[in-house]
Image (cartoon, coloured by chain):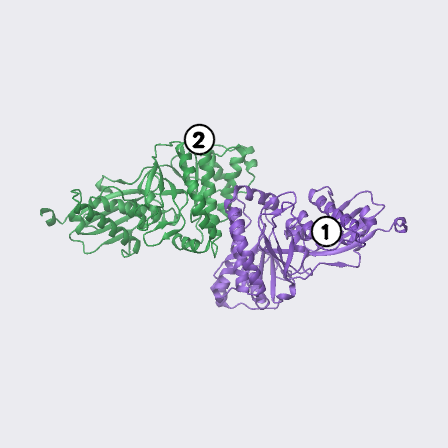
Chain colours: A purple, B green
Amino acid sequence: MPEDRTEQPHIVTCTAPVNIAVIKYWGKRNEDIILPINSSLSVTLHQDQLKTTTTVATSRSFQEDRIWLNGKEEDITHPRLQSCLREIRRLARKRRNDGDSGVDSASLSHKVHICSVNNFPTAAGLASSAAGFACLVYSLARVFGVEGELSGIARQGSGSACRSMYGGFVQWIMGNKEDGKDSLAQQVEPETHWPELRILVLVASAERKPVGSTSGMQTSVKTSCLLKHRAESVVPGRMVEMTEAIRKKDFAAFAELTMKDSNQFHATCLDTYPPIFYLNHVSQQIISLVHRYNKHYGETRVAYTFDAGPNAVIFTLQQHVPEFVHMVQYFFPPETNGADFIKGLPVNCASLSEELKQGIGLEPMPKGINYIISTKVFTHIYPHKQLLQHCIIGLL
Amino acid sequence: MPEDRTEQPHIVTCTAPVNIAVIKYWGKRNEDIILPINSSLSVTLHQDQLKTTTTVATSRSFQEDRIWLNGKEEDITHPRLQSCLREIRRLARKRRNDGDSGVDSASLSHKVHICSVNNFPTAAGLASSAAGFACLVYSLARVFGVEGELSGIARQGSGSACRSMYGGFVQWIMGNKEDGKDSLAQQVEPETHWPELRILVLVASAERKPVGSTSGMQTSVKTSCLLKHRAESVVPGRMVEMTEAIRKKDFAAFAELTMKDSNQFHATCLDTYPPIFYLNHVSQQIISLVHRYNKHYGETRVAYTFDAGPNAVIFTLQQHVPEFVHMVQYFFPPETNGADFIKGLPVNCASLSEELKQGIGLEPMPKGINYIISTKAGPGPRVVEDPTQHLLLSDGFPKKTM
């Protein structure tokens, strides 16, 4: 065919979001195809503040599959990468054989070059594997001309990546089947549903590298009976409650459940043997701050959630953002006084009353937090038409 | 009767031990008479290192019940104190009415003066209420001439006090009855059973006052579903395993279970809403130290347990004490270099190999630990025969030197 004679690679670039779980995933029932022991639910964050960008190129001239992450070539034989490549190609072939004319047979027969970058530092520990694998799968799908349900493939790269395949509020249904065909993500509500919801990512100061998620959750599944009880008896009810709270835009219910689930996840880490500590003294102080802040106003205005690392993610409504951000800055005074402390969406000024400061009654913890990213809920993955020059230079 | 005309008070002094739970009690099913949601098991510590001393005096001339704790008069109307006084008097009257001639009717009809001190600082957060109430109940029983099962009364002063009524290894059976008559402590093994077992209390630096146990466990019972599951489904099996490990003197099994139960207790605190943090960064570092130390030697030589406060209690066998104590001193270097750092039983010197220090691979945390008390398992409450040890003078009031 004429297309085969051209040396021009077929290139597609996409971006994908980070997601933050409010009902946590921790523990697999199947390590190979990544099936979880419980369902989970997340909020997709806006890509203006946090995203992965991935360019995929295919060409007859490429000798082998290759991948560059954040400027460095990585090992393409990594099992999780192989899972995604294998599964997306399998799906493309199946569609083609079923007569889907959208499938790009040429690309499907070629090797791929992949280049991916995050617009946030990897060292920040900000759930980049979810965004990364979601972006990879979505980009490969665009290159091969595959449409439809892709979350199951993203799931095999990194469990939580399936939730980054959708915007807004997303659930990952655990499924029952052994083959995992029913373990998929689906949108609960789009981002447009709750426009007043805001997210603040409190990026912690760099510390000793925490226990990685994959091995951490394996040890938890093996040793924690509280985790087993959580998965079987607690999470199902919470998924229903959380979905309801989001549907009704009931912030107090959403917030309380979010905090409880974060704490319960960390409780199961502590019930692991040996115990896993993701919450440090800064995390504990942030938690105290939130509870005291809510108590001061007699209402649940702010919620925290923590993943398998030191960063805190705060949920609140837009009217509370200025005061709470300045509270964080007051109780966790940064190294330099503040120009770089608040990133992302602009945050209005706010003054803190003496009454509030006294009411909180905590000792400031200097340099406990590096900076804050102010963001909101995001809507959907979309492909870019333009090319990223620095990525392409690496590919060609 | 001739005895009534004397103004001499009847004075008794007793001492009682501290106990450290290895299967934890956290949560009540009945607040009034203190019935727990699960059974618990503890090790009684030796009174040479940690004890409460209580003197009880009764006299016809006393106008009212009064109590002095660590030199200061306290409120005798505190419900927990009243429970103990009321219950011990009730038991004494019942025994007398049943014909028990040992009961001292005179004392029973009089008011009491009580004076109590600890030989360790209250600020150290070292479970003084267990020792305190056990001592109070034991002393009152001696004064009134009541013998036999007393742990049920101590329990009503402070839950864990019932376990301080015995030495060695003690379990508090949760019981089923509403009236709590079967919620009692009993000895699992005496302190002579496992002579090689050693305990190190790592007294933490003073910090923000943690959430008190009583309100903390109330909130946990109310809000933590993991706690409910623990009480119903996990603890019963662990009580059996722990009893077995102690009977067989299987240190590895004892140690692993102790660490798991401490961690699970703290996990339920984290699952409480609002969450309760008793483990701080020093606690986390001690936990890391223990796991790395055990990993370095490929065997479980040391175990930790933490209660509702920052102090760590370490269990180990006597041959490991010198090295581990020096490890703690190395990784938590004290303010002054060490003369007062190790208290209690003498600890031999030990040098730490570079290989060991590298193997642990942790950053030292200066002044994280104030001092260490080296101790062992010990006996239950006992009477102090030496009258010069009484904390109350013959007028029934505390010695001025206190």
Quarter holding residue A81: top right
Give the residue drawn at x 48%, y 66%.
Answer: A298
* Residue type, numbered disc 2: Gln
Question: From what the image shows, is residue A195 above or below residue B339?
Answer: below
Residues indicated by labels 1 and 2 sit on the same polypeptide chain: no
Q: Nearer the viewer, residue B343 or B166?
A: B166
Between residues A169 and A350, which one lies in front from this camera angle?
A169
Residue at which label 2 appears = B319
B58 vs B83, left or right, is left
Q: Mark 1 or 2, which is nearer the eye?
A: 1
The location of residue B217, given as percent across then percent down, is 41, 52
On the question of residue B25 being in view, the answer is yes
Three-letter code for the amino acid on which mark 1 is drawn: Val
Relative height, residue A379 to residue A308 (above, below):
below
Q: Chain of mark 2?
A: B
* Closer-to-camera residue (B337/B273): B273
Dot 2 alpha-carbon crowd within 10 angstroms: few under 14, some 14 to 19, many 20 or more: few
Residue A321 drawn at (x, y percent): 58, 65
Q: Please give left or right for residue A341 compared with residue B246 in the image.
A: right
Residue found at the far left of this picture: B2
Dot 1 corresponds to which residue? Answer: A137
Residue B350, percent from left and from top: 47, 32
Say which quarter of the image contains residue B95: top left
